[in-house]
Amino acid sequence: MLRSIGAVIGGFILWTVLWLGANSLLTIITPGSYNADGSTDSQFLMLVILILSVVFSIIAGYTAEQIVVDGSTWPVWALGLALLLVGLLVQISFWSLFPLWYNILFLLFLVPATLLGSRLAP
């Protein structure tokens, strides 16, 4: 049970660290691409951010599965749902700053990508 809880927490922390680090790096390597409110008008940059979100979700799901090791699926589902819930709260705060397609795709890919990552684990 502790491993399962650790898998959810560990996967969530890993996703968050990767996300914050990538956003910081993107801000540095694309100066002037972000507005003062944290949004961007660059559709290319939005696509990059979406792809990174999917990749980080896959990595988090993979990591959670590696921590669980007993084949239990609920920790990965819990991780995906936690990412979705927090993602929804964050997206609501940025809802008017990004186009609708971005907000929807960001949220839509979180759970499936997390589950895919868990299935990639040996």
Image: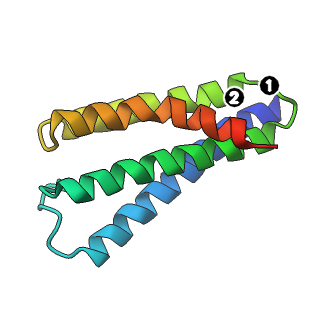
Q: Say whether residue 89 is visible.
A: no
Extreme right residue here?
70
On the image, the x and y values in percent for residue 59 come to 61, 49
On the image, the x and y values in percent for residue 35 come to 12, 61
On the image, the x and y values in percent for residue 10 come to 66, 46
Image: 32 above or below 16: below
On the image, the x and y values in percent for residue 43 come to 19, 53
Question: Disc 2 and disc 1: Cα gap in Å?
Answer: 7 Å
How many marks on residues? 2
Packing grade of label 1 (10 A; few <14, some 14-19, many >=20) is: few
Packing grade of label 2 (10 A; few <14, some 14-19, many >=20) is: many
Asked which secondary structure carries label 1, the reply is: loop
Q: Is residue 4 left or right of residue 116?
A: right
Q: Is residue 100 left or right of residue 53?
A: left
Q: Which mark is residue 5?
A: none
Q: Is residue 97 left or right of residue 90?
A: left
- Way the structure is coloured: rainbow
Looking at the figure, which quarter contains the N terminus? top right
Provide the residue designation for mark 2: 75
Provide the residue designation for mark 1: 72
Q: Amino acid at mark 1?
A: Ser
Q: Residue at x 51, y 30 (%)?
A: 111
CB-based contact (under 8 Å), mark 2 and mark 1: yes
- Residue 119 found in image quarter: top right
Looking at the figure, which quarter contains the C terminus? top right
